[in-house]
Amino acid sequence: MIFFCLGFRLSALSFIFTLVSDTIISVKNLTKQYSTEQAGGIKNVSFDINRGDVVAIIGESGSGKSTLLKSIYGFLKVDEGEIFFEGERIKGPDEQLIPGHKQMKMVTQDFSLNIYAKVYDNIASQLSNTDLKTKAEKTLAIMEHLRILPLQNKKVIELSGGEQQRVAIAKAMVADTKVLLLDEPFSQVDALLKNQLRADIKRVAAETGVTVILVSHDPADGLFLADQLLIVRNGELLQTGKPSEIYQNPKHIYTAQILGNAVVLSRGDAEKIGLKTFAATVVFYPEWAEINNNWSSRRFNVADVYYKGFYDELLLERNGVTVRALQLNRGAHKKNDHVQLNIGRFLEFH
Ligand code: ADP
Ligand code: MG
């Protein structure tokens, strides 16, 4: 009886474990270089992606984001390493007639839409004609998810960049796609509509269970919507994890800079403003520096005040060292004021 209970408990545990760690894509030691002489491509990258997650790959232009996305899709012949989709190795373009993967779809910056055809027809073209009722139902359903139902009879050429992006995503998703790969999905969308598209991608992923991998050079895209964030630089994966974990505990100075506009100081400069450290470099986000009269606060001169909407960013100077701090109480300080600053938390890089 005891053995039975134990066995039952163990199998229940492993069942729960499978539920929480359902890997859909696994990238193992992937390397893709375009030529031997020059840098470029990606180097020895490994990570897993959970089913249903929204994953954001963040990095500067030229860091290898599109290379990574195309490799996952099976569009590039990789040099080393393997990629698995539901445990099965993804074939490269040299191993099959039509490159790509049936259950994945990639939306690139050129959208690949028929601009003279109607929105509805662009999307419906992905489904077979064997069951016309299902074809219509699925097309209308995905248009509803992406809030483009009212555009169904318009030609693509009549739409804005943001609307075309939505049509391209709907077209990519309509045929039971399990993984949606989006290359810079926000690059052609106005700032105002960006927030809405971001939120919609997150909602559609949650509603349909599709796994989304998107790449962006703008970290704001990733922080806001991703379940998992990957930071790439020069073809290397610097760090991966939940956005909040990476933001709070960046492993590289670069990560803190790209995510949070961090203040980076040498040990010498850190000491000049009263931070004691043995590390070579000290890093903190502006919001970790607080203007108050704590025992540990130090006097700074306000070198400049930048208006940032709902807060001010203060450029503060002490002993020739400048740092940035946030002031939510807008207008509280002006240039040449003196303030007491307490840097509550900072990271040390050796
Ligand atoms: P990202 O999408 O992050 O801007 P890419 O993956 O497009 O970066 O490119 C990464 C690097 O590889 C860049 O230095 C780029 O110039 C180089 N690269 C990309 N595609 C090719 C190609 N087809 N041939 C040669 N070099 C390439
Ligand atoms: Mg790119």
Image (spheres, rainbow, N blue to C red):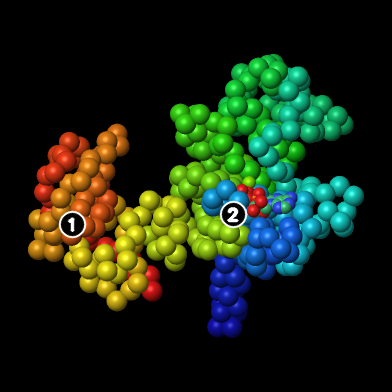
Amino acid type indicated by mark 1: Arg
* Residues at marks 2 and 1, CA–CA distance in whole angstroms: 36 Å
Q: Position of residue 302 (x, y in %)?
A: 17, 46
Split into 4 quadrants, where in the image is the C terminus? bottom left
Compared across the picture, whether 218 is left or right of 129 comes to: left
Q: From the image, state whether disc 2 or disc 1 is nearer to you.
A: 1
- Note whether 153 is above or below 218 in the view shown: above
Residue 192 seen in the current view:
yes
Residue 22 seen in the current view:
no
Q: Which residue is mark 2?
A: 63
Asked if disc 2 is less than 8 Å from ligand 1, the answer is: yes
Using the image as rendered, state which of residue 274 and residue 140 is in the foreground.
274
Compared across the picture, whether 63 is left or right of 264 comes to: right
Amino acid type indicated by mark 2: Ser
Split into 4 quadrants, where in the image is the N terminus? bottom right
Query: Residue at coordinates 79% horizontally, 49% vertically from top-left?
Result: 100
Which SS class for mark 1? Answer: strand
Q: Position of residue 250 (x, y in %)?
A: 42, 62
Query: Residue at coordinates 36% horizontally, 55% vertically from top-left?
Result: 262
Q: Which residue is mark 1?
A: 318
Q: Residues within 10 Å of mark 2 (few under 14, many from 20)?
A: many
Q: Position of residue 316 (x, y in %)?
A: 21, 50
Compared across the picture, whether 254 is left or right of 142 comes to: left
Using the image as rendered, state which of residue 118 and residue 131 is in the foreground.
118
Query: Residue at coordinates 55% horizontally, 74% vertically from top-left?
Result: 9
- Note whether 273 is above or below 301 in the view shown: below
